[in-house]
Amino acid sequence: MSADPAGPSEQKGQPGLVSAALSGLCPRCGAKTLFGAPAALADECAACGLEIRALERGGRFVGVVTMLLALLLILAALGIDEWLRPPLWLSFLFWAPVTVGSVIFGLRFYKTMWVYHQYEESQQP
Ligand SMILES: [Zn+2]
């Protein structure tokens, strides 16, 4: 979108996105305040008062992301079931935490990416 070939040294925040999503770091002050629940954003940063909710304008896509993740997981589960034919209890033992973990991480990563993007946009003059 904003491909700037002559971009100088403005690449801050890009490499840290995964760790920002994992620890829920505020885009402004870097405190671990981005998430109020494992997969839900906080209303505002408790450290610097940044209004995180106001930055979350892509919320309507969250359902789509969750559905895509679930679809991928179901396809993977069916594939592995067909391939290895594991006992039912083993499938359940494996897929329950994997599903919960993937959905939570997917949502966290998606929301972090979105909030950081919105925050950078809001910093442009
Ligand atoms: Zn903050």
Image (cartoon, grey):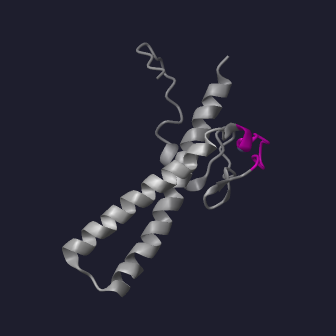
> In the figure, residue 90 lies in which quadrant?
bottom left
Q: Is residue 30 above or below residue 119?
A: below
Residue 101, image x and y in percent? Answer: 48, 65
In the image, the segment drawn in magenta is: 43-54
Q: Residue at x 20, y 72 (%)?
A: 83
Q: Is residue 20 visible?
A: no
Residue 78, image x and y in percent? Answer: 30, 69
Left or right relative to 52: residue 15: left
Q: Residue at x 64, y 33 (%)?
A: 119
Q: Residue at x 69, y 40 (%)?
A: 29
Total marks drawn? 0
- Decide whether residue 50 is among the magenta residues: yes
Q: Is residue 67 visible?
A: yes
- Decide whether residue 45 is among the magenta residues: yes
> In the figure, residue 40 lies in which quadrant?
bottom right
Left or right relative to 44: residue 31: left
Q: Main secondary structure of the magenta part?
A: loop
Residue 41, image x and y in percent? Answer: 67, 51
Residue reaching furthest to the left = 83
Left or right relative to 78: residue 64: right
Residue reaching furthest to the top = 6
Q: Nearer the viewer, residue 47 or 65?
A: 65
Q: Residue at x 26, y 67 (%)?
A: 79
Q: Quadrant of the C terminus?
A: top right
Q: Quadrant of ligand 1?
A: top right
Q: Is residue 40 above or below residue 12?
A: below
Q: Nearer the viewer, residue 25 or 79?
A: 79
Residue 42, image x and y in percent? Answer: 72, 52
Q: Is residue 66 above or below residue 88?
A: above
Q: Nearer the viewer, residue 29 or 113?
A: 113
